[in-house]
């Protein structure tokens, strides 16, 4: 059995991110077991350590969070994902959005 997934480790400052590139011919392979539960575990660990897990299926990008997946649709190479997290005492409250490459900087 082959996963049809290639994993890349990317560092941004102190953040350690994983990007999972999925073969577009097998776009749902990342949602099958045993891969999906492993992605969810990595997502929980990533939130705790300021990292994120993204899945790229061609140019379509998903952010994997412990309790949900966020579909950002088609993204350009320079688009950024912004994530704000707040610990509510029980779990992370997470707000995420895509910052397009042409967005003005603050």
Image: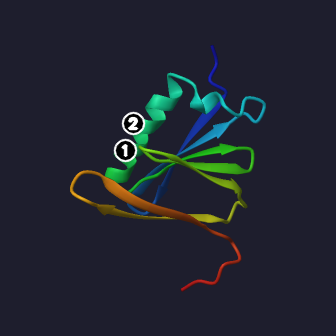
Is residue 35 rendered to the left or right of residue 75?
left
Assess disc 1: are there few (<14), some (14-19) or many (≥20) residues with their C-alpha within 10 Å of its C-alpha: some
**Residue position for label 2:** 41
Is residue 21 rendered to the left or right of residue 69?
right
Per the image, label 1 sits on a secondary structure element best described as helix
Say which mark, if any, is on residue 44.
1
Quadrant (top left/top right/bottom left/bottom right) for the N terminus: top right
Question: Observer-nearest residue: 5 or 34?
Answer: 34
Residue 61: horizontal and vertical position, in percent?
A: 65, 50
47 shown above or below 41: below
Q: Residue at x 67, y 70 (%)?
A: 100
Residue 79: horizontal and vertical position, in percent?
A: 65, 65
Q: Residue at x 65, y 40 (%)?
A: 21
Q: Residue at x 69, y 72 (%)?
A: 101
The answer to which image quadrant residue 55 occupies is top right
Residue 12: horizontal and vertical position, in percent?
A: 47, 60
The answer to which image quadrant residue 86 occupies is bottom left
Question: Between marks 2 and 1, how big is the CA–CA gap?
Answer: 5 Å
Quadrant (top left/top right/bottom left/bottom right) for the C terminus: bottom right
Is residue 2 rendered to the left or right of residue 23?
left
Callouts 2 and 1 close, C-beta under 8 Å: yes
Q: Residue at x 39, y 48 (%)?
A: 46
Q: Given the current orientation, which residue lies at the most extreme right position?
A: 25
Say which mark, if any, is on residue 64.
none
Per the image, label 2 sits on a secondary structure element best described as helix
Assess disc 2: are there few (<14), some (14-19) or many (≥20) residues with their C-alpha within 10 Å of its C-alpha: few
Q: Given the current orientation, which residue lies at the most extreme top position?
A: 1
Is residue 69 rendered to the left or right of residue 58?
left
């Amino acid at each position: 059995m082959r996963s049809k997934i290639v994993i890349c480790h990317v560092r941004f400052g102190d953040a350690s991110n994983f990007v999972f590139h999925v073969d577009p011919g097998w776009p749902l392979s990342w949602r099958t077991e045993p891969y999906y539960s492993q992605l969810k575990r990595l997502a929980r660990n990533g939130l705790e350590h300021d990292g994120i897990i993204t899945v790229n299926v061609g140019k379509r990008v998903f952010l994997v969070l412990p309790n949900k997946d966020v579909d950002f649709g088609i993204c350009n190479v320079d688009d950024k994902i912004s994530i704000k997290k707040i610990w509510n005492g029980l779990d992370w409250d997470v707000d995420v959005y895509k910052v397009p490459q042409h967005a003005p900087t603050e």
